Image (cartoon, coloured by chain):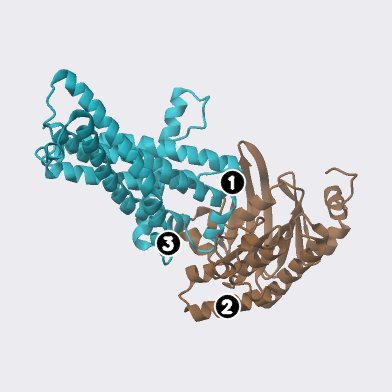
Chain colours: A brown, B cyan
């Protein structure tokens, strides 16, 4: 296995004195799809935002490419974030049309001509199966379409790390699987390191190379998708198989 | 300033004000940094100038007309009791207006109109993760959201306050004529006005515009907790901006009294 590209060591985070993360250690190998699963409100999104440098942990360290981002100032963090694309749970699309939303990272990161930007946006839209929607306003589109636009925006700058926060939340099973397939295809095409957090275990296990489960502020499982399915850890077994009886 | 903490003691409230001041100062210094080092989106400053300027103009004109009319009427009533001579009414009113009232009184309604808008817009973006999305797209929120609003508020805030001052003066002149038979030629008297008054008044307009943008943007960026949080941020932006205007007025007026040439007792 390749060495970890993202390494979290002993991460602690609390909100209003209520601990959410209590010493989480995660290693995400390079060019791997790492699925982080767990019950609702267990701190999955918080952990993803800590990886992105959007939330600072109270204790612990986050290494990306062996650089400790917890020690960085806002300008250095901004440089690190240029290597990361992120899809947000509630889309977080701007009040602009589809074209401007997807082109936004390109305009901020590179000095490209408008023709080049048009070409890359058209390629992304074709990739997420939404060709010809450049002029549409995201607010008038369906949840699945918004997620696809979010995927296009997160990946247009070809970042080496992509973070997906609940990419299928609120979507029907067919659209969900299409989104997962898209995430897998994108990762295969670019070789990016991907972290996906999801409550939809069945779907996310179809694409994950490795799986981690958060429970009670700690990582209680870390292994392959098959190992997760066969795990005898009571919390993992109950969550992965959707059982009503158990510790959760 | 934090208005949410109703149950805190005086000491805690003072600490909160200091914390708020530090947060506002941090936004201000970052705004100055990105003012020179940032990446502007084409047309964004013009769009913000339109929001601050054109969309506030009618509201400000009406408000300042009423304020000018009320001040002149009350001044006339009081001076009638003491000294029934209105020959210097316009001259003193003009000095007061240029030196202080046009900027300081005008900035308060401007803060409610513009400050609330800035805080609500940025606050909504915070609670829908759009501000985090900006960060992930290599756009610092201060650079992308605050700097254009800061520039727009400084420029258009000044323009609006100057226009408001003219409207207040015109309204005062009309009231003086109708209520106290003061001829507009008599009212229109520049004898007490000097360069120091103009400098001080103009400086206040610039500073108040900047303060409204920075305080409101800071409150917007500090939003948390969904739509209720946006409501609180909007309220705090208006309260904070008005408080900043009053404090800055005291500081500028005091410093100006000693430093700006030509400013002082008439």
For mark 1, name the chain.
Answer: A
> What element does badge 3 sit on?
helix
Q: Are marks 1 and 3 in contact (CB under 8 Å)?
A: no
Residue at left offset 83%, top offset 48%:
A235
> Where does the image place residue A155, in percent across and percent down from the top left?
62, 70
| Badge number at residue B122 | none
- Describe residue B188's horizontal placement relative to residue A57 as left or right: left
In 3D space, how far apart are the residues under numbered discs 1 and 2 (Cα atoms)?
A: 40 Å
Residue shown at 29% from the left, 38% from the top: B104
Residue A196 position, x and y percent, is: 70, 61
Residue B238 pos. (x, y %): 43, 39
Along the line of sight, the residue nearer the viewer: B123 or A57: B123
A247 left or right of A126 in image = right
The mark closer to the camera, 1 or 3, is 3
Q: Judge depth for marks 1 and 2 and give the one in front.
A: 2
Give the label on residue B44, or none. Answer: 3
Q: Mark 3 lies on which chain?
A: B
Is disc 1 in the same subunit as disc 3?
no
Residue A176: image quadrant is bottom right
Q: Mark 2 points at which residue?
A: A120
The number of numbered discs placed on residues in the rendered structure image is 3
- Foreground label between 3 and 2: 3
Please name the residue that numbered disc 1 is placed on.
Answer: A59
Disc 2 chain ID: A
């Amino acid at each position: 296995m390749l060495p970890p590209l993202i390494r979290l060591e002993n991460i602690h985070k609390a909100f209003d004195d209520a601990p959410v993360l209590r010493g989480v250690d995660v290693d995400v190998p390079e060019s791997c799809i790492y699925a982080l699963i767990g019950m609702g409100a267990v701190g999955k999104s918080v952990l993803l935002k800590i990886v992105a440098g959007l939330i600072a942990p109270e204790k612990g360290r986050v290494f990306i490419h062996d650089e400790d981002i917890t020690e960085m100032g806002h300008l250095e963090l901004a440089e690190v974030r240029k290597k990361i694309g992120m899809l947000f749970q509630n889309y977080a699309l701007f009040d602009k049309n589809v074209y401007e939303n997807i082109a936004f990272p390109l305009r901020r990161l590179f000095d490209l001509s408008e023709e080049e930007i048009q070409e890359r946006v058209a390629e992304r839209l074709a990739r997420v199966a939404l060709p010809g929607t450049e002029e549409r306003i995201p607010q008038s589109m369906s949840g699945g379409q918004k997620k696809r636009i979010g995927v296009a925006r997160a990946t247009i700058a070809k970042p080496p790390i992509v973070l997906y926060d609940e990419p299928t939340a609120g979507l029907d099973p067919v659209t969900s699987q299409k989104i997962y397939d898209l995430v897998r295809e994108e990762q295969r095409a670019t070789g990016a390191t991907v972290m996906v957090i999801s409550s939809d275990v069945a779907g996310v296990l179809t694409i994950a190379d490795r799986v981690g489960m958060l429970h009670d502020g700690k990582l209680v499982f870390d292994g392959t998708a098959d190992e997760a399915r066969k795990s005898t850890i009571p919390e993992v077994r109950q969550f992965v198989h959707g059982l009503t009886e158990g510790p959760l | 300033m934090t208005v949410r903490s109703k149950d805190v003691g005086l000491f805690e409230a003072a600490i909160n004000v200091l914390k708020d001041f530090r947060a506002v100062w941090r936004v201000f210094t970052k705004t100055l940094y990105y003012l020179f080092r940032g990446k502007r989106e084409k047309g964004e400053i013009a769009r913000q100038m339109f929001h601050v300027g054109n969309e506030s103009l009618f509201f400000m004109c009406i408000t300042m007309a009423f304020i000018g009319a009320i001040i002149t009427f009350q001044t006339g009533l009081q001076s009638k009791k003491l000294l029934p001579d209105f020959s210097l009414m316009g001259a003193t009113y003009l000095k007061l207006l240029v030196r202080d009232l046009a900027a300081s009184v005008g900035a308060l309604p401007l803060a409610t109109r513009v400050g609330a808008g800035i805080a609500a817009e940025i606050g909504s973006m915070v609670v829908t993760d759009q501000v985090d999305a900006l960060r992930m797209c290599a756009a610092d929120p201060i650079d992308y959201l605050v700097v254009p609003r800061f520039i727009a508020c400084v420029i258009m805030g000044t323009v609006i306050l100057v226009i408001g001052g003219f409207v207040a003066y015109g309204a005062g002149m009309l009231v003086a004529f109708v209520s106290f038979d003061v001829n507009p030629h008599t009212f229109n008297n520049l004898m007490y006005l000097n360069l120091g008054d103009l400098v001080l008044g103009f400086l206040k307009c610039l500073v108040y515009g900047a303060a409204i943008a920075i305080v409101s943007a800071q409150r917007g960026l500090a939003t948390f907790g969904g739509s209720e949080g946006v409501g609180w941020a909007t309220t705090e932006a208006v309260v904070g901006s008005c408080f900043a205007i009053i404090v800055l007025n005291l500081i500028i007026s005091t410093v100006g009294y000693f430093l700006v040439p030509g400013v002082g007792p008439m």
